Image (cartoon, grey):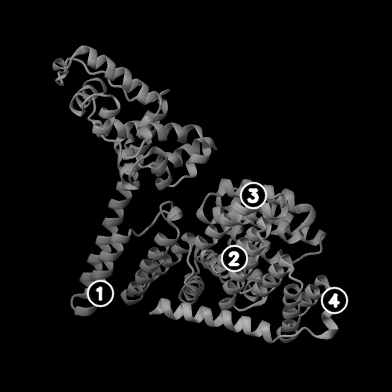
Amino acid sequence: MIKKYLILLSLYFVNTVYAQEIEFKIPDSLRSKNYDYLFDRIEALKDNRAKQSLYLKSFLYKAKAEKNSEEIVNGYKNYIYYSPENLKQVYADSMIYTAKKAMDNSLIGSAYLSKGIVYYAQKKHNYALDNYLIANNYISKTNDKYLIYKVKYNIANIKYYLGFYDEAISLFRECIDYFKEDNTRAYLNSLHSLGLCYNKIGNYGLCSKTNEKGILEGQRLANDEMKDYFIHSEGINQYFKNNYASAIKKITYSLPSIRKNKDFANEAVGYFYIGKSYSDLKEPRMALSYFKKVDTIFDDKGYIRPDLRENYELLINYYKSKNNPKSQLHYISKLLKADSILNNKYRYLSGRIYKEYDTKELVLEKKKIENSLDKRKHNDLIFISVIALLFFSLLYIAYRHIRNKRIYRQKFEELMKKSEITTKVEVKNINYGVESINQDTVTVVLKQLEKFEKDKKFLEKDLSSIKLAVAFDSNAKYLSQIIYHYRGKKFVEYINDLKVDYIISLLKNDNRIRNYTNKALAEEAGFSSTQRFANAFMAKTGMPTSYFIEELKKEQL
């Protein structure tokens, strides 16, 4: 029912827009004006929407009357920039429709890129990336360098958001070199994003230098649109340098401009680091007011990102210290909601963030506090028990985490010491039943196995002993016995280990592969499912894929 309502609503908006265009007639005084003039008037009247509407309509009507596909797309782009949120996607779809009719790769790519930017502004990052990738597919077929680098910039923003900071840094540097000469705003945006990446990888000195350069370059180029964003970035950077008073001052200075831009994401981040600064200055009441501002934005906009998760941990801890279980319970519920969003929306990041509160433990604690509040009996004893349970649970989680890390590290070092991974295992003095097989048959099958391994035929999906036996002109029983005797493994383990060894070799030798998801790695190795790949990798190496990749990246630095 809701889906049907949304479709009808969307059709209503499209029909309304179309009807308005049909009824509109361009004034005689504007008929002879060119597109540059109309665009300049649109820009100049951004604070007077009523008058601006005349020029928006005139621009689009003129382009349609002249059947100028490029300017029709630009006309819809003007509307995207200045229209309400509920119409932006309608105009973006109109851009794409027009561009496809023109069969122009640059226009189509630009239209999809604009649609992705709309999604990104709405913090719908998955949809944004989908459209960026479609845009890149079309733009890569052209020689339009501006669009090529515009795609790079926007994909770099997604990579930054997903935590692939090194890749994002590389792309932002390319964008800085390209945009420096011809596009001031894109140049300053790229500098700002580069500074954010330096902060995330812990290079606070380089972050400060980049922010300072951004402000100076803005002055040189007479463009102060990004000044407050560089100050905002530097304020957060000062927090990580332990300069809390400076952090509060800089972020507070930047916030009016950020609020004016309706940039609720950076507003929330600013509040969070002001709150963290007050907390580290031992002013918990001041910190509390800012943490609650972050919570308000979460309520109003549904916006959360991994580093803001800590906001709820700090609120829970505050009310725990005040012996206020009702408020503690309230923010535990908020944290669970935030985790649910993060796990769905930020899968790449959620596994990297150390969580002070394990979700399972949070649910247990939540139930215990609810019971204590409902019964109203033995409140003090129950609350102390909950705290004790939480404390020992956290100790156990910490112990388990440290123990696993130690085991994983040992396994990693053992794996890296091997110059060449081999699946062949010499088995001595063990009889697996091969004595009943003709020796010539054994010899032939072993040669076939060597060629099978050398040619990487094991990457085939859904490979079974029966299929391989048919390919070898043998039978499944003999094949399994020979593999068991000469490789020391049952058939499924033998195939899985070959696939895992192949992936390990790729990860060691190709930096790009280290950014693949488990799903992509499973596809690469020919596993029938992601879970089977994850299980096989763990069984073979004694560690999760994510840990192995993280350690490889550390060794690269």
Of callouts 2 and 1, the N-terminal one? 2
**Residue under numbered circle 3:** 140
The residue closer to the viewer here, 372 or 84, is: 84
In the rendered view, does 422 fall on the left or right side of 305?
A: left
- Closest to the camera, between mark 1 and mark 3, is 3
Residue 192 % position (x, y): 66, 57
Residue beneath disc 2: 115
Earlier in the chain: of badge 1 and badge 4, it is 4
Earlier sequence position, callout 2 versus callout 4: 4
Image x and y of residue 413, in percent: 39, 31
Residue 506, image x and y in percent? 46, 34
Q: Nearer the viewer, mark 1 or mark 4?
A: 4
Q: Which residue is mark 4?
A: 33
Residue situated furthest top in the rendering: 440
| Sequence-earlier tag: 4 or 3 | 4
Instruction: Find the distance from the CA under tag 1 to the CA under tag 3.
Output: 57 Å
The amino acid at mark 1 is: Glu
Q: CA distance from mark 2 to mark 1?
A: 45 Å
Q: Could you tell me how far apart the alpha carbons at marks 1 and 4 are, in whole angstroms?
A: 69 Å
Mark in the foreground, 2 or 3: 3
**Mark 1: few/some/many CA within 10 Å (<14, 14-19, 20+):** few
Compare residues 175 and 193 and report the one nearer the observer: 175
| Quadrant in the picture for residue 347 | bottom left
Q: Quick one: quadrant of the C terminus?
A: top right
Task: Tell me the element at label 3.
Answer: loop
Could you classify mark 2 by the number of other residues whose Cα lies within 10 Å: few (under 14), some (14-19), or many (20 or more)? many
Foreground of the two, 1 or 189: 1
Q: Amino acid at mark 4?
A: Lys
Task: State the mark number for residue 370.
Answer: 1
